[in-house]
Image (cartoon, rainbow, N blue to C red):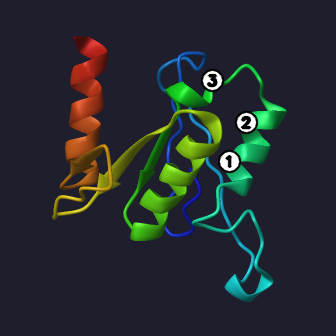
Amino acid sequence: MVIPRWPPIVYNDETPAGSDTTLWDSPLASDNCPCRKPNPGMALEYLEAHPEIRASLSVMIGDTDSDVEMGRRLAAETGGCAVFRIDHRNDPEADVTFASLAEFARGVGSALEG
């Protein structure tokens, strides 16, 4: 949900297919902001402002260790959040690892069709 170099897509059961939300973290690490990865503050604020979104049906998609950690922390805070990693190597901390963004898109497309 919060990735500075690569914008993520947030899907949930309340959002029509094809729509998305992108959140960015921008404070410096020295600011120790709860909204900076791997802290889940920005995602928690967004979920609080949008109670129609069920966190347990949200997905964190990222390509760094801090993205995965942020998704894990968000899941711990909310009771749910799937964590997808985009990387050529399998990440045991992620729920699912895709080798590329294209592979992820194919997987989502297949799931929506099936």
- The tag on residue 47 is 2
Q: Tell me which residue sits at (25%, 13%) in the image.
A: 113
Q: Are marks 1 and 2 in contact (CB under 8 Å)?
A: yes
Identify the disc placed on residue 43.
Answer: 1
Estimate the spatial distance between the alpha carbons at disc 3 and disc 1, rounded to whole Å. 12 Å
Residue bearing the label numbered 3: 54
Are the residues at dot 2 and dot 3 in contact (C-beta closer than 8 Å)? no
Measure how far apart labels 1 and 2 are at the Cα level.
Answer: 6 Å
Residue at disc 1, secondary structure: helix
Which residue type does callout 2 highlight? Leu
Q: CA distance from mark 2 to mark 3?
A: 8 Å
Say if 95 sits above or below 34 in the image: above
Local packing at callout 1 (Cα closer than 10 Å; few below 14, some 14-19, many 20+) is many
- Residue type beneath disc 1: Ala
Give the amino acid at mark 3.
Arg
Q: Residue furthest right?
A: 49
